[in-house]
Amino acid sequence: MPTETFEFQVEARQLLQLMIHSIYSNKDVFLRELVSNASDALDKLRLEALRDDSLDVDVSDLHIDIEADKSARTLTVRDNGIGMSREEVVKLIGTIANSGTAAFLRELKEAQDAKDAASTEGLIGQFGVGFYASFMVADQVTLLTRRAGESQGTRWTSDGEGTYSIEDVADAPQGTSVTLRLKPEDSEDRLHDYTAPWKIREIVKRYSDFITWPIRMAAEPAATASDDAADPDDAEDADDAAKATEPETLNSMKALWARSRDEVSDDEYHELYKHISHDWNDPLETIRLHAEGTFEYQALLFIPAHAPQDMFMQDFKRGIQLYVKRVFIMDHCEALLPPYLRFVKGVVDAQDLSLNVSREILQQDRQIQLMHRRLAKKVLSTIKDMRTSHADRYATFWREFGPVLKEGLLSDFENRDAILGVSSFASTHDAQELTTLREYVERMKEGQQDIYFMTGESRQAIENSPHMEAFRAKGIEVLLLTDPVDEVWVQAVPEFEGKQLRSIAKGEVDLDTEEEKAEADSAREKRQEEFADLLTWMKERLGEHVKEVRLSSRLTVSPACVVSDTHDVTPALQNMYRAMGQ
Ligand code: ADP
Ligand code: MG
């Protein structure tokens, strides 16, 4: 096939423009992204070789090579991993699959238009542009790749300005190499000289030290080892020359989860997080767990600082990475954590699983189920600690992930109390601050038996509701539940620490003392008789739309309100079902 030219997808083009004009101040991360991709490709190849006997590849020497050419001003990152077919190159490199991209780009444009540099960079950080980060430092990028098991290779080239070209290559080595032609404007800038070995060493050490594959750098030819002219003695010394061509391994390859806490810096944990999550921001929380005994495993989990755009979408990829004895087995392993913790990222490394485990086996495996339980509890207890010791971090957590976590109230019976314990809610007690159920219970009035709540679309809508009147008049606190999921879990959770959860919009809500009640009852009976004709007439007029029309004791201002039976579906839930097409 001759060389073909393609246009980048619109979103991809917009992102590339951002990269070319480099709005991100830390350009060094381009190398982290390329190494991260190479590492993924090696993981995939080893796994495929393990699964597929017919795949004829050598997996005995998998590695990543970095090669700089000072005079040509190019930098190449090469791996002998899985590689890509021609179709894959077009699909994976020319388009952006992430479903949140469009929304992200809109937000980004607004920040840029407002000339808000800080939030612009923050947004870019949240997104993580991967391969395209190359265009921060290069004015031309060439990718040469051949997929394991295929004979035809592919060369992809682009200057990032709208189009890329693709051609077939007959003799490409298996795997992928990415060659950057570095921008001339950085050549005089020592800090951005990406051909300098010290610089490459430093970036790899900082961002990619934990990568489990060797990241190697070809030794400098003797002549360029120092800035001086070549030393003729060196060239003549055969031993030295041999030594000089031996590549240098730049990373320690130590699995962070297997090392003790005090051996690993926070920064190192954060870089691992960025590698697995493809997030460019630091995580909110790092969780370590070492299980010893008959079933030994280590886990390193992270709570991100931002909810991903697509967390509520059907095709959201959840789950953590599974390793067996340091060997990467699979990404997005769903069996290890419940769906309501789908925002958690990380690694679990088990000692005693077969390297051949499949997703189906995992779902059934008893040891995996035990791990699942233990990890869920560990995440919940971490959130609890965060709430007591780091209030502002917890506030961030709850803002980003509260609605997802509450799904667990419906599905995870065993941890229901733990989830309720770390949940917080808006309340009439305070216009801004959220409250926990425990705090609510502590504030309950003398004689108050139940925890009152009302669900609705917004705080304001609830506060304007006639149902609130009696509670306001009596100064009784009401929780204001406005997340769509609130409609559902309140149906499933009857109580918290022995106190019933009661909707103020349902059935008879009783706020009076026995005395007041007796008084009110007789008064109402009398008035009920007085108004009997009117009530019957109203019931007839309203016909099928209501079950009953009765005098109310709870309204102080509004003339009438609609109440549902205790077990009826609330109006908001009706709307939700309608929206879901049920
Ligand atoms: P991400 O890594 O977040 O998926 P990238 O932009 O970094 O996004 O890469 C896009 C995709 O291109 C990768 O998911 C992978 O499928 C493919 N890819 C990139 N680099 C390589 C490589 N060195 N070998 C094989 N595939 C690669
Ligand atoms: Mg990547």
Image: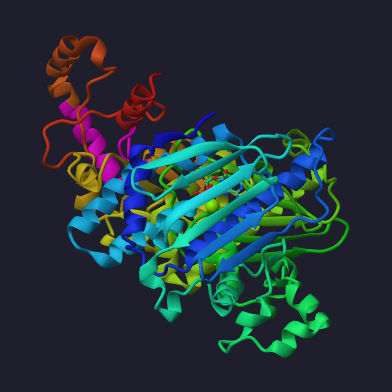
The magenta segment is 503-527
Residue pictured at 52% horizontal, 54% vertical: 278
Coloring scheme of the render? rainbow
The x and y percentages for residue 253 are 72, 68
Q: Is residue 521 magenta?
A: yes
Q: Which quarter of the picture shows residue 356?
A: top right
> Is residue 394 rendered to the left or right of residue 255?
left
Name the residue: 32% across, 63% down: 23
- In which quadrant will I find the N terminus? top right
Side of 299 where 11 appears, left or right: left
Q: Locate residue 274: give its quadrant.
A: bottom right
State the residue in front, 226 or 298. Answer: 226
Q: Nearer the viewer, residue 46 or 368?
A: 46
Judge whether 378 appears above or below 219 on screen. Answer: above
Residue at horizontal 35%, vertical 42%?
Answer: 11
Query: Does residue 424 appear in the picture of this structure?
Result: no
